[in-house]
Image (cartoon, rainbow, N blue to C red):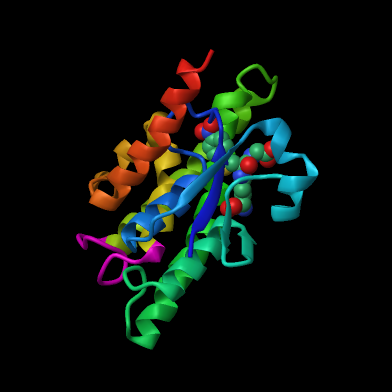
Amino acid sequence: MTITITAFQASPDRGRGLARDMHVRWALEEVGQPYDVRLVTFAEMKQPAHLARHPFGQIPTYEENGLTLFESGAIILHIAEHHPGLFPEEPDARARAIMWMFAALSTIEPVVVEFTTTLIFDRDRPWYADRLPVLQDRARTRLGQLAERLGDADWLDGEFSAGDLLVIDVLRRLASSGLLDEFPTVAAYVARGEARPAFQRAFADQLAVFTASQAAP
Ligand code: GTB
């Protein structure tokens, strides 16, 4: 039973592992499932073959035994439900891990993405200087709330779970902004996630794709 995911053939993040295939790679490494990667160009992502996998023409996707999934959250949920390692056994703890997955993607990620995309892409806009501090403060508020909940714990709710995986991978997008440095416990939490051997393997694999794309004629 082969798992195949899709990823950028040449990621715009230049090997920093910020695209969402990284969520899926990391999850598969955590549960010890081997997988193949189908690399797609931006043009191929909008062609019928890929649109059949992903109606919005994006990555990542996940294929296994005739099942095709898109949306990284749904993919992580599927992986965590079918393989031990990302969800606790106890039903209430499992429900809370799923709660953190939703929090990552619907409460933390929008604030993080709006701030970082404005920071990176909108510098020349006339409204940039007024807007950026607003978005930065929203991200700062979320990080403060997260720091409060995390306290001095290693993970958000007991053992490392799919909830931590998604929260950490979403927070990684803040790395170049410097905002994480204002919240040392959250920065340490992200670093703990990145230090996991499964994360390291996933990161190395996506970096190898980027390196190969640079070497290609
Ligand atoms: N909600 C979907 C999910 O979670 O799977 C969102 C999927 C998504 O946004 N995919 C992006 C994509 O395919 C790649 S991850 N974009 C191409 C398109 O829409 O045409 C987003 C991303 C891209 C690049 C960087 N980067 O360069 O740092 C970071 C994140």
Residue 190 in view (yes/no) = no
Is residue 158 inside the magenta stretch?
Answer: yes
Q: Nearer the viewer, residue 205 or 130?
A: 205
Residue at 75% in and 46% down: 49
Image quadrant assignment for residue 151: bottom left
Tag count: 0
Q: Is residue 55 above or below residue 83?
A: above
Magenta-drawn stretch, dominant element (helix, strand or loop):
loop
Compared to residue 76, the image places residue 54 above or below, namely above
Splitting the image into 4 quarters, where does residue 207 fall? top left
**Residue drawn at point x = 34 percent, y = 73 percent:** 84
Q: Where does residue 92 sit, x and y in percent of width and height?
A: 38, 85
- Estimate the x, y position of residue 120 in percent, counting from the top left: 55, 26
Q: Is residue 199 visible?
A: yes
- Give the residue drawn at x 71%, y 36%: 44
Residue toward you, 9 or 102: 9
In the image, is residue 44 above or below residue 4?
above
Using the image, determine if residue 13 lies above or below residue 115.
Answer: above
Quadrant field for ligand 1: top right
Does residue 44 appear left or right of residue 13 in this picture? right
**Quarter of the figure that contains the C terminus:** top right
- Residue 162 position, x and y percent, is 39, 64
Extreme-bottom residue of the structure: 91
Residue 63 lies in the magenta-colored region: no
Which residue is at 49% across, 59% downward? 2
For this orientation, the residue located farthest to the right is: 48
Q: Residue furthest top?
A: 217
Numbered range of the magenta stretch: 151-163
